[in-house]
Image: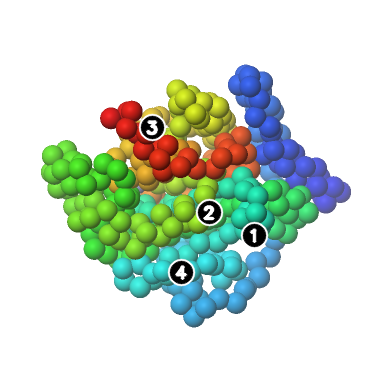
Amino acid sequence: MKKFIALILIFILAGCSNITPIENPITKTEEVNVSVEKTESPLVKPILSEVEKVEFVKVPETKAVSDFCTKIESKFHHYGWGRSHCDSFSWNHVRNSVLGDPLIWAVYGDEDAHKEEPRNMTLIMCGVHGDEITPIKFCFDILHHLYQKTHTELGKQKLKDNLIVVAPIVSPDSFFKKRPTRTNARGVDVNRNFPTKDWSKSARKLWASRYGKDKRRDPGKTSMSEPETLFQVNLIKRYNPTKIISVHAPLTILDYDGPTMAHKHFHEIGSNAENLLDQMSKMAKGYTVKNYPFFPGSLGNYAGNERNIPTITLELPSSDNRKHKEYWEQFKLSIDYAIFHSSLKKSNLVMSEKNNEEESGKKN
Ligand SMILES: [Zn+2]
């Protein structure tokens, strides 16, 4: 009997994340609300956790990654987060942080198939600011969630048409400090260090004039001077994401950078992105959607503004390590929905640099 209810639940969840984009946002809202109510019924809740209890199995890792996982596990213990199961994920590792920790990412879905025919590709990054510790746990919750999917038939089906990359600790040097900091080991804010077109002209100037050279927001001496920035840029180049989700804290908003409805080439994607944020908000108890500005050298500027890659920033309400379960509960449906939502996929993935320059030329 339990198995039967569990199967039904999987079916409901799968259906909920596969809602096709509909022109009329009202209809869409109704559909989503129905799904949310179903998953929140007291009967279903305990079974959900049962379904999600697939056993984690260790996989072979390189020594560097294995040592890094040991460090992560000990931080998880320290913050009372339970097991990270870091050693159960097949990590990719190419470059290191300033202090030599591996910058790792995990891939779900078929990377080879994506190269041949681009899938709905979601890049998720956490721990860009190392003192925002709870977002790092949040990325591991996403990883655990995806891991479960690889163990169910329906989950495997869904992963087949999608590609998901999760980089849970972009700035490990800051996270592993005794007192974690926003900036990396060289004191650079890696979310102000992207090679945006306005960087040379404005990044350091704005840092001085608006932020009084606040040490927490130092954009670096030159753009892309930091390995943690290069890491993010290379993930974007390598995977050509349909959308990016970046998790921070504590602004308590969902923010969007990327093509808007007013964009003459990306009108539809802009409109679908607006709907997606709306749905994500509804599925997370009406979380505030707010348009937060982007900055010289920020991810929102580099990916969203300059490359028209819809970039969603989820700012959790705090970095309080004790709130990790509460936050995952609040956002897991909207994150699952966003990952498997394919209406932002464009046939012509990224605009050519030339077109892109023309566009921003007009704005200036
Ligand atoms: Zn942040």
**How far is mark 1 from mark 3, CA to CA?**
32 Å
Q: Which residue is mark 2?
A: 239
The yes-or-no answer for disc 3 within 8 Å of ligand 1 is: no
Q: What's the distance in space between the residues labelled 2 and 3, CA to CA? A: 23 Å
State which mark lies toward you, 1 or 4: 1
Please report whichever mark, 2 or 1, sits nearer to the chain's N-terminal start: 1
Looking at the rendered structure, the kind of residue marked 2 is: Tyr
Rendered location of residue 82, percent (x, y): 53, 62
Q: Are marks 2 and 1 in contact (CB under 8 Å)?
A: no
Label 1 CA crowd tier, 10 Å (few <14, some 14–19, many 20+): few
Q: Earlier in the sequence, mark 3 or mark 4?
A: 4
The answer to whether 92 appears left or right of 134 in the picture is: right
Q: Any mark on residue 94, and which?
A: 4
Q: Nearer the viewer, mark 3 or mark 4?
A: 3
Asked if the residue at tag 3 contacts the one at tag 1, i.e. Cβ–Cβ closer than 8 Å, the answer is no
**Residue at 61% in and 34% down:** 343
Q: Is residue 332 visible?
A: no
Measured in 3D between alpha carbons, the distance from the residue under mark 4 to the one under mark 2, in whole angstroms, is 15 Å
Give the residue number, with chain letter if any, for mark 1.
Answer: 112
The percent coordinates of residue 288 (x first, y second) are 44, 30
